[in-house]
Amino acid sequence: MLRIGIVAGESSGDYLGAGLINAIRKLRPDAQFEGIAGPEMIAAGCKPLAHSEELAVMGLTEVLTHLPKLFRLRRRLGAYFLKYRPDVFIGIDSPDFNIGLEARLHSAGIYTVHYVSPSIWAWRSHRVFKIGKAANLVLTLFPFETALYEKHGFTARYVGHPLADRIPDKLDRVALRKSLHLPVQGRLVGLLPGSRRTEVERLGPLFLDTAQWLLAKLPELAFVVPAATPALSNVIKQQIRTLKPDLPVHVVEGHAREVLGAVDVALIASGTATLEAMLCRCPMVVAYRVTASTYAMVKGLRLLRIKHVSLPNLLANSEVVAEFLQYRALPHEMGPALFKLLEDEHNRNEQLARFASLNTMLRMDANERAAEAVLNLLTSNMSQAG
């Protein structure tokens, strides 16, 4: 019997964990899993010692409020795995929780894997040493990440991105519009100002102003905003009522990925949504703003180490999509970029062609590759020990 400890926080980690569990079980039907799991991992057969919702804490205030509880949970989980030692422990994302736990188990001689590298390529690059010393193996979703570990002598494997395996090459935009109760005819523009309240409050009005600029040029357009939660849906609807009551905009609760598959072009806050848009073959323009104090600190301390912030540009190491950051994030700047994607077929097709090549790079049967890497870690170390 193969015993595997596993911890995932938030829905994205639960999704990755379930895929990994199923892939390992195909190779090792005797494998048993236990740890912190969400509904998908539990459905895949993981015994929950705690629920992944306990790690889904967003924002500085929320984190500080929950810190004592999180520390107690990590100590309890560490004591459990030291008593009932798994053959390997896998920490999925949630680095602030998992890396400390991995370090404790690793120092006790338990093999550890960290799945999903934090953004050490963007900031706090020194974390590479903490992660590399805590984990026998780091599994990365993006190809450029492995070199950051290997140059310091740590073992990392690029496995590809499970979303690239899951999203089909061609999406039925008409069917998606019907399922979302959106207009089937005419051109639709997606507005995705973020999944957190602070982002929506900061970027929502800016995105609505950009939509108004675009509508003045192309009066037949309609717009759609996917809201991550019911609370954010209320915030967005209030912004529309207050700022742009006559704008032809639909608000959809959830279903951001389906919206990206349904629209003709999207204005997106920098983040994981840019990856989903690329995988859905949705032409896009990217924007982001932080508070003036945060921007001054990042710029003054030179914390940001990259030329681009959106994932398509990072993957391509060039500007595939236009980025409008901080003081450049203005309606009269972003509007023309969106207009060009709508009206210039060559520009649109060029971006879509780059998306297709990047999607191919990420489509690597990630669950299977991750499973093989975990099992290879065990077999190679056992053979060395023998």
Image (cartoon, rainbow, N blue to C red):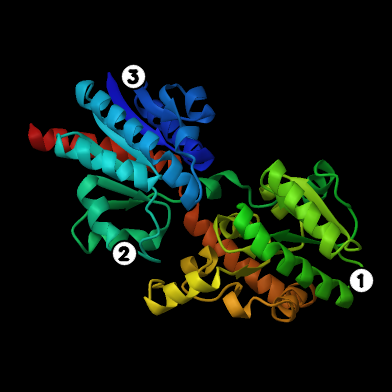
Q: Residue at horizontal 88%, vertical 52%?
A: 184
Compare residues 319 and 300 and report the one nearer the observer. 300
State the SS at label 2.
Answer: loop
Name the amino acid, label 1: Pro
Quadrant of the drawing holding the C terminus: top left
Compare residues 327 and 47 and report the one nearer the observer. 327
Q: Residue at horizontal 80%, vertical 69%?
A: 211
Compare residues 32 and 72 and report the one nearer the observer. 72
Within 10 Å of disc 3 (Cα), the crowding (few <14, some 14-19, many 20+) is: few
Q: Residue at horizontal 70%, vertical 54%?
A: 260
Which residue carries the number 1 mark? 219
Q: Is residue 198 left or right of residue 33?
A: right
Asked if residue 384 is positioned above or below residue 189 in the image, the reply reads above
Q: Residue furthest left?
A: 386
Which residue carries the number 2 mark? 125
* Residue 87 drawn at (x, y percent): 23, 28
